[in-house]
Every structure is written in C-alpha cells, then in structure tokens.
Amino acid sequence: MHRLLVISVLTVTSALLGHAALAQQQFDGRWSVHAIPEKGSCRRAHYYTVVVENGVARNASRQAGGQISGGLDPAGHVRVSVQRPRGRADVTGELKGRSGSGAWIITGRVSCSGRWTASKWG
C-alpha cells in the first residue's frame, strides 16, 4: 500500500511533464505533500517531498513507477491515474499558488481513499 500511495501523491506533481510552460514555471520548486487516509485499509498518513524543476517532478528520495495518465492543466487542476500490477490510484485536486489539495483513491489489492494537501517551500 505504501508504494502505491507514494506513487499516487508523487503523480500529482509529476503530471506537470509536457504541459504549458507557464504552468510548469508556476509550480517549480520543492513541495511538501501530506497524504491522509480516511476510508479503507490504509491507516497511516504519509509525508513526501517532491521537487519540480522546469515542469519535471520527482520524488526527493526515489523515482515513482507505474503507468501514469492524465495531468495538471495550466490552471492547476489535477486529474491523474497511476496503474500498477497490484492496483490503481486516482488523484484529483488543484494547485493554487503555493498550496494545493485534493483527494485520492486506491483500488485493487488494497482499497482505501483519502485526501492530500501540498505546500510549496521557500
């Protein structure tokens, strides 16, 4: 569950790949992301650091895996899906300025859902 949750949250900012330069520049920097489970078998909240440079996002400690679809539009609306062999994660929400929030749901071997918040450092 932990890996799929990590991938889900990272995908929120990873979706910046290939989108408008304005959106990419606006969201560049270090982001702290807090994923909070609310329903299902996921019990622990997780914190992640995501670095976005020139619109390309990466986990500050390791790369995410899985088949990613969707993305972030220039207005900051997030709609991303991550498909992995053991499950699927769907992430929705919005980034605005230096913060963001939304919801996530994991289905498959583990089923749970919750919300996420993000804030930009510096």
Image (cartoon, rainbow, N blue to C red):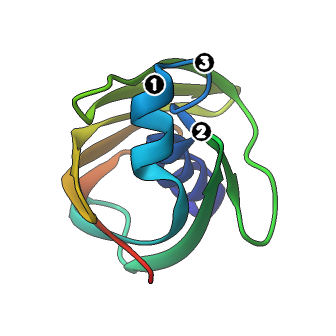
Residue at 47% across / 79% down in the picture?
47
Give the mark, 3 or 2, whose residue is nearer the N terminus. Answer: 3
Q: Position of residue 121 (x, y in %)?
A: 44, 80
Residue at 60% across / 48% down in the picture?
7
Q: Amino acid at mark 3?
A: Gly
Please report contact status of discs 3 and 2: CB closer than 8 Å, yes or no: yes
Please name whichever residue, 95 or 122, is drawn nearer the observer in this view of the structure.
122
Please name whichever residue, 46 or 77, is drawn nearer the observer in this view of the structure.
77
Residue 55: mark in rendering = 2
Q: Amino acid at mark 1?
A: Ser
Residue 81: mark in rendering = 1
In the rendered image, the quadrant that contains the C terminus is bottom left
Q: Position of residue 13 (x, y in %)?
A: 49, 45
Q: Position of residue 89 (x, y in %)?
A: 45, 35
Question: How many dots with numbers?
Answer: 3
Q: Amino acid at mark 2?
A: Gly
Residue at 54% across / 64% down in the picture?
29
Residue at 54% across / 73% down in the picture?
48
Residues at marks 3 and 1, CA–CA distance in whole angstroms: 16 Å
Q: Which residue is mark 3?
A: 18
Residue 116 visible in this rendered orientation of the protein: no
Local crowd at mark 1 within 10 Å, few (<14), some, or many (≥20)? many
Residue 33: quadrant of the picture: bottom left
Circle 1 SS class: strand
Residue 78: quadrant of the picture: top left
Give the mark, 3 or 1, whose residue is nearer the N terminus. Answer: 3
